[in-house]
Amino acid sequence: MKSFEGNFKLGVLGGGQLGRMLIQEAINLNVSTYILDPDEHAPCKDIASGFVLGSFKDYDSVYNFGKDKDLITIEIEHVNVEALKKLQEEGVAVYPQPEVIELVQDKGLQKEFYQKNQIPTAPFYLIENKAGIADYVDEFPFFQKMRKGGYDGKGVQKLDDSNNLHKAFDAPSVLEKMVDFEMELSVVVARNGDGDVVAFPPVELDFNPEANLVEYLFSPARISDNVANEATEIAKKVAKELKIVGLLAVELFLTKEGKILVNEIAPRPHNSGHQTIEASYTSQYMQHLRAILNLPLGSTQAKTASVMVNLLGEPDNDGVAKYEGLEKAIGLEGVNIHLYGKLYTRPFRKMGHVTIIADSLDKAVEKAKIVKETLKVKA
């Protein structure tokens, strides 16, 4: 499933920043990359070998886009699975596999998968609509997560007690018992077609409380070796049980009692793996390509400590993006800036990221704070 003579066509559903960084690595393997995205200003538009304007949620658009490709992959999981199944039947390779994407699209199926395969996760209940919450009033507090359609904190609502029910979603949902956690971790795993599995070291995530988006990422995570090993083994087990081909980000809770619970998974390159571009021997994007092309998987060893800062649109700013403090930030040693090429900014939109590398995590954290205060995205 590979050819590096320039005639191999890789199709990617989604043309955002993840696709953009995937293309940058695909070029190094002489792989031609084609993008399907509904945004005429998509970050991938001007650097892809070919760009098709269309919805990756629409059956005909996905099928027609994919039928002349050698392999289809994704940079967003909210895609038309039925079209991918049809393409796979007709001989087009699809990685991650449609059945994996279908499971990940539904948070209820995810939870049932963990339960079936004895993968630790927070207690949960499945409901069909808002009225179903009445059966679990003795279980407050919990998070209500819509089974389908949520991303980047959207489709998630904290429900402390019955006085919060006016905020509840009237849709099929997961009610997840609130976990008293010490920190959130992520492990990015890769599995190729031969079944080889490797994992990047766990990273620590720090979230913006207003937007529920990752603001900082710390690598290595500030955890014990025992916790790191357990998190890694759990993440590998998820990938093996799924039999996924490609990259899988496994987001985890470390509870205050020292337990590790799987929160959610994403079958693609992930925000929690951006630092691998500069700080690891193999980037997550090259690793994804190696996995879906069934090549030997690369080393996941980190070369250096790093902090990743998400570059988010400033609050109360909506319009054509302008970058303030760019020259000052880029002038700092060890600072690597990635702008995603998005024309318009809006509050908390992911507009880029900055990875700071240093010979110690403390030094990287110190510079990351300077970058956070200096570099702003405004309209």
Image (spheres, helix red, strand yellow):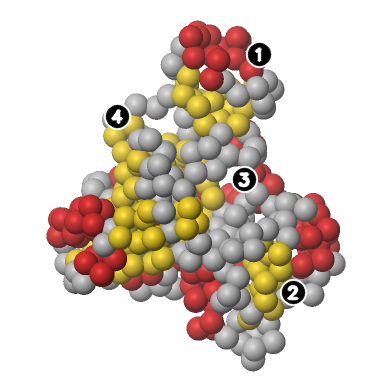
Relative depth, front residue between 291 and 62: 62
Residue 256: image location, x then y, percent: 29, 30
From this view, report whether residue 232 is shown above or below residue 278: above
- Disc 4 residue crowd, few under 14, some 14–19, many 20+, Cα 10 Å: few
Query: Could one spot residue 111 in this view of the protein?
Result: no
The Cα–Cα distance between marks 4 and 1, rounded to whole angstroms, is 33 Å
Of circles 4 and 3, which is in front?
A: 3
Residue 247: image location, x then y, percent: 53, 60
Q: Which residue is mark 3?
A: 104
Compare marks 2 and 4 and give the one earlier in the sequence.
2
Compare marks 3 and 1 and give the one earlier in the sequence.
3
* Residue at (67, 76) in percent of width and height: 50
SS for dot 2: loop
Q: Which residue is mark 1?
A: 131
Quadrant in the rendering for residue 111: top right
Q: Which residue is mark 4?
A: 257
SS for dot 1: helix
The Cα–Cα distance between marks 3 and 1, rounded to whole angstroms, is 25 Å
